[in-house]
Image (cartoon, grey):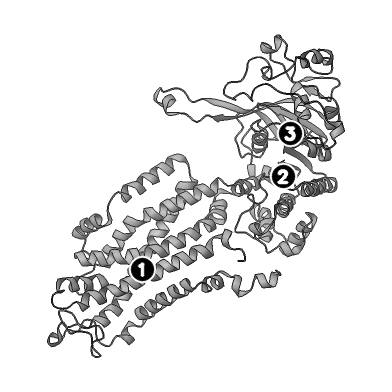
Amino acid sequence: MSGPLLKLEGLHVRFSAARGIRSLLAGREKQTFDAVAGVSLEIEPGECLAIVGESGSGKTTLARAINGLTPIAEGKAWISGEPLHDKPDWTAVRRQTAMMFQDPVGSLSPRMTVRNLILEPFRIHGIAIGEPERKARKLLAAAGLSQEFLDRYPHQLSGGQARRVGVARALALDPALLLADEPTAGLDVSVQGEILTLLNKLRGELGLAILIITHNLNIIRHVADRIGVMYLGRLIETGPVEEVFANPAHPYTRALLAANPEPDPDARLTRIALKGEVPSLLARPKGCEFHPRCPWAHEDCATRAPDLASVSGARRKARCLHPFPDFECRSEAAGGK
Amino acid sequence: MSIAERSSFKYTAVGRLMSDPLAVAAVTIIALLVLCAVFADAIAPYDYKALNVRERFAPPSFVHLLGTDNLGRDTFSRLLFGARIALFVGLTSVGLAALIGLMLGMVAGFGPRWLDNAILFLFDTLRAYPTIILALALGALLPPGLGTVILVVVLTTFSEYGRVARTQTQALSAQEFIDAERAMGASPARILFMHILPNVLGPFFILAAINLPVVITIEAGMSFLGVGVAPGTPSWGATLKDGFDYIRNTPWLIVSGGIPLVLVTLGFTFLGESLRDVLDPKLRKER
């Protein structure tokens, strides 16, 4: 296959804000906001990209837009050359993009047995399978569960087991892209490890591309090749995981990494305290959207809006007027305040 | 616990239902009622229509188990045939009302906003009419008979089923497994029938079971008011009405006319409660 598997160009997802009775009476126009505001990215076949960011940064909405669960308001998107912005055949698109949801048990239909849950994708797409029983066992085994789970109902499964069923179901149709929304949310740390190892293994075996959405930075190092940091619906930094972790270019990434719990007490980084709260999507700050919270903000940050531009090599990009490391010397002065 | 044990009788829905003494009582009452209705011809000692003027207002005795009414008709025989009417009216109107309510409610809960509003408006309008007022109005317009009774009951009760179906559908649609189904490419029809319907049905059976005696009471009430079944039909309500009219002559008529209504109400209410315990998937764990 030539070209990227998934390509997004200036993708916008728009929601309208709930209106209060006062604005209804005043006849004010419906307010809208962009939960995803112009995201451009590419995923190569077999690549794993992790999207991180705070709650409300638009990570999940981005994944839902790729799968058509939330309509694309503006911008363009292609999956293996098929345009998603131009009324695609979603059934066909969804056949090659599997999605895993945050709640491992809640994303399984409660009155279906594991067997039926795993075979559901085949039935939806009307794919004939010679021996359903064998297929179900094989898929379950690939996800690391024994066949005795076939007759269980979702409420009889633990979080980790339900997640494995979710993995088995996601892989049933041999998708090209897996959209994994918080694949480790709500799981014990040991189970998180097992699930990540499983995803890694399957990725190696099947050549699957994965888009992982998470706010858990620790899991990214285990699975992802590249990382994309989102803030207020925009990507603010992208690059290879190792490089971004070693030397984040955007102040927000730096703060995010510094806030990450580190198991080794000696290796603890100095915390970077961000001022204030995440701004409302209805009132985006002017200039650089991060400047009101940025400990290193310059005067021009309040007026000039930065683009996602290359920093230190073609593989890394950051949306910052004064990205690290060239800004390193000034940071100490600011940090001393 | 092994898989074999898990699928044993104790863990099937019927098995769990039968381990509840309340449910056993309910099923016994309902079974008796059904037997009476089905074999009324064989059990009844007299023809329910046969007049016997010489034995008017007879008290209970071995000749007439529950006495006779103002025309000397055997009350016990009339009550047996009344079970037939009660069950027929109850099952038909509950079935129809539940079916209409289920379809409209699921469409309202799953469909676009305007359709939801339109269907809700219909529900609210019908809900606003007290059953008896509607019964009197329709009873005056239409010829008395079981058809009129069923029509009134369906008109006044289907919105209740509709509301339950709509609320359930809406709550389910917001759940992640519905998103997961959509993300896999499932069609709206498949989501509605394969994933929402089975989860709506549980509460529905409970509601239907609890509503069945209400419906039978409505039929009795309409017959009591004279807008129900045609005169001479051995409905329980008609028996009660006769008992009311002649309460000075004989108290037995009104007592024996009320007993089956009490039994039916208890039976189906118990059944509804036990069904709720059994049909809720969250309670379906080994206790």
Q: Looking at the picture, does residue A229 appear above or below residue B184?
A: above
Which of the pair B138/B165 is nearer the observer?
Answer: B165
Give the x, y percent position of residue B142: 21, 60
| Closer to viewer: mark 3 or mark 2 | 3
Which structural element holds mark 1? Answer: helix
Q: Which quadrant is home to the N terminus of chain B? A: bottom right
**For this view, does A255 lie left or right of residue B60?**
right
| Closer to viewer: mark 1 or mark 3 | 1
Label 1: how many Cα within 10 Å (few below 14, some 14–19, many 20+): many
Question: Which residue shows up at 44% across the image and 22% down it?
Answer: A28
Q: Amino acid at mark 2?
A: Gln
Label 3: how many Cα within 10 Å (few below 14, some 14–19, many 20+): many
| Closer to viewer: mark 1 or mark 2 | 1
Give the x, y percent position of residue B197: 52, 56
Give the x, y percent position of residue B14: 54, 72
Q: Which mark is residue A309?
A: none
Instruction: Give the labeled residue for mark 3.
Output: A51
Q: Chain of mark 3?
A: A
Distance in Å between CA atoms under marks 1 and 3: 59 Å
Q: Is residue A220 visible?
A: yes
Q: Chain of mark 1?
A: B
Distance in Å between CA atoms under marks 1 and 2: 55 Å
Query: Within the image, what quadrant is residue A139 found in?
Result: bottom right
Q: Amino acid at mark 3?
A: Ile
Q: Looking at the picture, does residue A248 appear above or below residue B276?
A: above
Label 2: how many Cα within 10 Å (few below 14, some 14–19, many 20+): many
Which structural element holds mark 3? Answer: strand
Instruction: Give the labeled residue for mark 1.
Output: B265
Instruction: Give the labeled residue for mark 2.
Output: A96
